[in-house]
Image: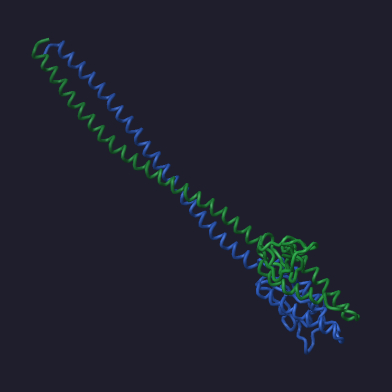
Chain colours: A blue, B green
Amino acid sequence: MSEEKELEVAEEKNAEEIVDNQAVEEVEAEEVVELSEVDELKIKLDEMEDKFLRVSAEMANIVQRNRNERELLQRYRSQDLGKQLLPAIDNLERAMATEATDEQSLGLKKGVEMVLESLRFALKEEGIEEIPAKGEVFDPNIHQAVQTIPAGEDVPSDTVVEVLQKGYKLHDRVLRASMVIVAQ
Amino acid sequence: MSEEKELEVAEEKNAEEIVDNQAVEEVEAEEVVELSEVDELKIKLDEMEDKFLRVSAEMANIVQRNRNERELLQRYRSQDLGKQLLPAIDNLERAMATEATDEQSLGLKKGVEMVLESLRFALKEEGIEEIPAKGEVFDPNIHQAVQTIPAGEDVPSDTVVEVLQKGYKLHDRVLRASMVIVAQ
């Protein structure tokens, strides 16, 4: 091979190498782009799955919370109206305690008694009942002591000896504490 | 250029082309793999986004539905207890209508009147009110005709002339229709 030819071939080789390198670089660049798109998609997919799982868990929480709230609303729905009925029941009981000797009064009291029974029944249906007090151990959560008397043989200490005003509870909630006299 | 040289160059070119083609094919093959992974990821991402959007929309529906349910539960919470109080009110009103001349009866009636007022107030607080009836145009949705009388000059046709038992509604719901006499 002549020197000229050798040079030519060498140049050609060189040029080829440069072209090859460029091609390799292009391919590498493409791969980088392709890889990063895959990675990007994978990241996005992970994020989206994460969002999906979080919103699903949140929904499950909301459903459960709502079920509980509905149950509570249902369970204590008569709290306000029930509470407002208590003075009416007090007054009717007071009326029942008055003396009645003539026919008119006796008739009225009979009517009042029927009403009282129907009110008590209606309240019971809604879960509202009288708080046991007389003879019970004093419990500040359900009894309100307005007077004390000394404990003795018949009246053990910390016992409710008299109820001045009946207390009522709605299931486990106290609507009104019993006003009581306690032995101490 | 000599023929030999031309042939050499041509062969070299050919060889280059073959190599190039191989490279292209390799790149194309790689691209197919890469594209399908990208496509797969894109499909998965679309699906996941779709699931996320659907569960989000479902959650929004649930939240809205629960809000409505809670509002309804709250609005009509006193329906059952209120309904059960109506006969008590009827009876107290009946007691109020009886004759009372002596002191005992007058005292009892005064007590009954107070109770009636407190009951009516308690019901009103919960949205329970008497259905207007006497003098109103007869409406079968809220009035129950138990008797008819002929319409005349003073009593236009289709008018409620007398109420035999008061009706009550809780907001827009009829708890008990008014029992009425209608002119026809």
Q: Relative to B95, does residue B162 appear above or below in the rendering?
A: above
**Residue shown at 90% from the left, 80% from the top:** B101
**For the C terminus of chain A, which image quadrant?**
bottom right
The image shows residue A3 at horizontal and vertical percentages of 15, 11
- Is residue A183 visible in the rendered structure shown here? no
Left or right of residue A3: residue B92: right
- Residue farthest along the left direction in this orientation: B4
Nearest to the observer: residue B159 or residue A137:
B159
Give the number of marks. Answer: 0
Left or right of residue B1: residue A28: right
Which of the 4 image quarters holds residue A131? bottom right
The image shows residue A8 at horizontal and vertical percentages of 18, 13
**For the N terminus of chain A, which image quadrant?**
top left
The image shows residue A109 at horizontal and vertical percentages of 81, 82
- Residue farthest along the bottom direction in this orientation: A153
Which of the 4 image quarters holds residue A68? bottom right
**Residue shown at 18% from the left, 23% from the top:** B16
Q: Relative to B11, does residue B54 appear above or below in the rendering?
A: below
Q: Relative to A62, does residue A116 appear above or below in the rendering?
A: below
**Residue shown at 28% from the left, 36% from the top:** B32
Which of the 4 image quarters holds residue A101? bottom right
Nearest to the observer: residue A73 or residue A52:
A73
Nearest to the observer: residue A39 or residue A98:
A98
The image shows residue B63 at horizontal and vertical percentages of 56, 53
**Residue shown at 82% from the left, 82% from the top:** A97
- Is residue B113 visible in the rendered structure shown here? yes
Q: Relative to B33, does residue A154 appear above or below in the rendering?
A: below
Nearest to the observer: residue A150 or residue B173:
B173
Left or right of residue B31: residue B49: right
